[in-house]
Amino acid sequence: MSGWEVFVLMVSGSVTIGFVIMWYYKILRLWPRSHNVTGRLVLGALPILSFILLLRTLQSLASYDVVDNALFIVFYLLLGFLCLAFGSMMTRMRLDLSWEDDALRLGNRAALAAYACAFMGMTMIYLGANIGDGPGWWSVVFAGGLGFAAWLALAGLFNKYAYVSERITVERNISTGIRFGAYLLASGILLGRASSGDWTSWWMTIVEFLAGWPVLLLTLWALQVERADASRSHDRGSRHDQTLPTALIWAVLYIAFAIVSVMLLPDIPGSPIPGWGARP
């Protein structure tokens, strides 16, 4: 490993250890033990699920010099949790979604649904950035950074025009939490696809990132659904106008749209996942 790689490994390892310890410490110290059992279980499972998905990706779809190298697999796992720690901080700052305050301490199930999907959406972006051959860790950070920046920017615009954070954190509208969470996960899948593929150059990575254009259609679609629901709720004087089953249907449709969009895009040579990792 080069000097920079050793430095990144040390920083990633330190941040990951602190992030994981504080994550589970906050979950375990919540009292009484009977409070918010569902939230504890979901939040406790998120880092484990991300770890499994990232490990399987690094072992089978990552760069040729990573898949059989245990040290580099550990390196990219730790780098991934560094990115998730940063993403969690930005999600709180830009989207007003706090896993600790809203989802855990206050037992807000709307926030729990939204944040859990946001966490997995960020995981999908980093997962996609690791698919394909590349010259080093910086290519993963650059490609994944494009995906995360677009994901956060679109989610911020979504929140600005649909006021979803207020409906989730203040009104505790679980239907809004489920729909917004599904949007965050679906957009993560699409932008993870856009971040994947073999590295050629900085400029071509930006050009090839445009393969994630279906995320714009998804954003416009989901935004229209939220604004229409908010309008109906306001007219009828109800904060919970749309029923839970309807919200679940929208959630399934968002995620199905993302998966179908990925499958319809060209395949990367040798990839076992249709559409995923392909770059035109």
Image: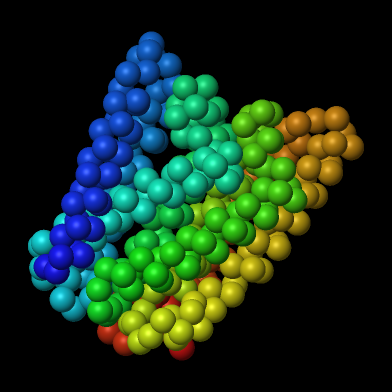
Task: Tell me where residue 160 appears, x and y as whole percent.
Answer: 71, 49
In the rendered structure, the answer to whether residue 85 lies left or right of residue 231 reads left
**Residue at the spot 36% in from the left edge and 53% down from the top edge:** 83
Residue at 41%, 81% in the rendered image: 202
At x 55%, y 64%, the residue is 150
Foreground pick, 7 / 171: 7
**Left/right of residue 96 with respect to residue 201 in the rendered view:** right
Q: Residue at x 45, y 30 (%)?
A: 100
Would residue 238 be found to the left or right of residue 12 on screen? Answer: right
Residue that protrudes farthest toward the front in the picture = 3
* Left or right of 41, for residue 209: right
Q: Is residue 43 above or below residue 73?
A: above
Compared to residue 144, the image places residue 183 above or below, namely: above
Q: How are the residues colored?
A: rainbow
Image location (x, y in percent) of residue 241: 76, 36
Specify whether residue 259 is in view: no
- In this rendering, the answer to whether 168 lies above or below 51 is above
